[in-house]
Amino acid sequence: MSRSQLGVVLRATDLSYQYGARDADMPAVLNATVEVCAGEIVAVLGASGSGKSTLLALSGGLICPSTGRVQVVDTDIHGLQEKARAAFRREHIGFVFQDYNLMQSLTVLENVSLIHELNGTKARIARKSAVEILDRLGIAPLSRRFPGQLSGGQQQRVAIARAMISRPALLLADEPTGAIDSENAEIVVRLLLEVSGQGTAVLLVTHDQGVARVADRRLTMSDGRLGEERPAQLVGTDL
C-alpha cells in the first residue's frame, strides 16, 4: 500500500498569515498549500525569516491564519473553540519547538509523560513509556533533573521525546536536530523514520542535510511563499 493510500493527515490550503499591521510589506506566510500523508516525512527548507516556523504554527493550530484552512485527520482545527482545539492538539499533534518549551517546574520524566497522562494513560504506564523513549535518546539518567539543569542539546532531546511519546497522527518539528551533535542527530533521524513507518505524518523545518535526505518530499520557502517540491536526492551544500 502506498503512503498516499494511507490517507492525508494534514491538509493546509491557501494559508496566509500576517504579523502586526495588515498593510505590512510582507506577510509571514502567503497562500501556502501543503498536504502530508500518513507515514510521510515532508521537509521544508529556507532562509531564516522565510516563514517556515509560522507555517508549522499554523499547521498545528497554535495561531489562526488570516486566510485559508487547516485540516488534521479530517478536522478543521481552526473551526474548534480554543479549549477543544487544545484538547485536539494534545491527542493528535506532537510538537518539537526550537525553544524547547519545556515546563521548568517539572522534571524531565514529568515533562515527557505529562501529555500521555492528560490523554488518559495511567501514570505508571505513561512514565514507563517516557523512560523507554528517554533511554533511546540517551538521556534516561537525566530523568529526575529539571530543564534548567540541562544543556540546550539535552533539552532538545527531551522535547523530541515528549513530542513522540503518544505516537501522534501528526508530528511538527522545528529544527529537531538544531541543538544536538551529529551522533545524537542520527538517533533523532532514526526515530523520525520509525514513527513515520508506524503511520505518523511528519512535517519538519530543517537546515540539516542529513534530516532533509530522509524526507519523502522537500519543499522550499522564501518570503512567505511555499515553493515547488525538490527531490530529496538533490540536497546540496547550498542549504
Image (cartoon, grey):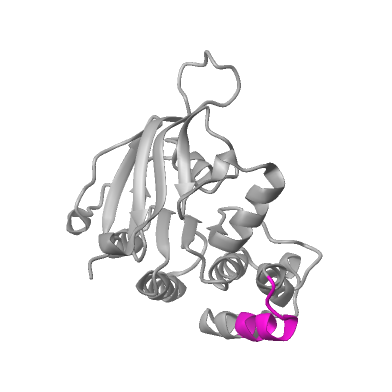
Please tell me which residue lies in front, 148 or 133.
133
Farthest-out residue, right:
105
Which residue is pictured at 62% across the width and 43% down the height? 80
Residue 182 position (above or below residue 175): below
Name the quarter where the N terminus is drawn. bottom left
Q: Residue at x 58, y 39 (%)?
A: 79
Does the rendering let one see residue 176?
no
Front residue (pair 231, 202):
202
Residue 122 placement (x, y as % from top left): 72, 81
Asked if the stretch drawn in magenta spans residue 34, the answer is: no
* Residue at 68% across, 74% down: 113
Magenta span contains residue 130: yes
Determine whether 237 is above or below 2 in the image: above
State whether residue 56 is above or below residue 24.
below
Q: Main secondary structure of the magenta part?
A: helix
**Residues shaded magenta:** 120-131
Residue shown at 69%/43% (left/top)? 82
Q: Quadrant of residue 29?
A: top left
- Where residue 211 appears, x then y in whole percent? 35, 62
Q: Is residue 102 left or right of residue 239?
A: right
Q: Nearer the viewer, residue 161 or 149?
A: 161
Left or right, 171 with reference to 19: left
Residue 165 at x, y = what percent? 57, 73
Image location of residue 216, percent across then percent down: 27, 60
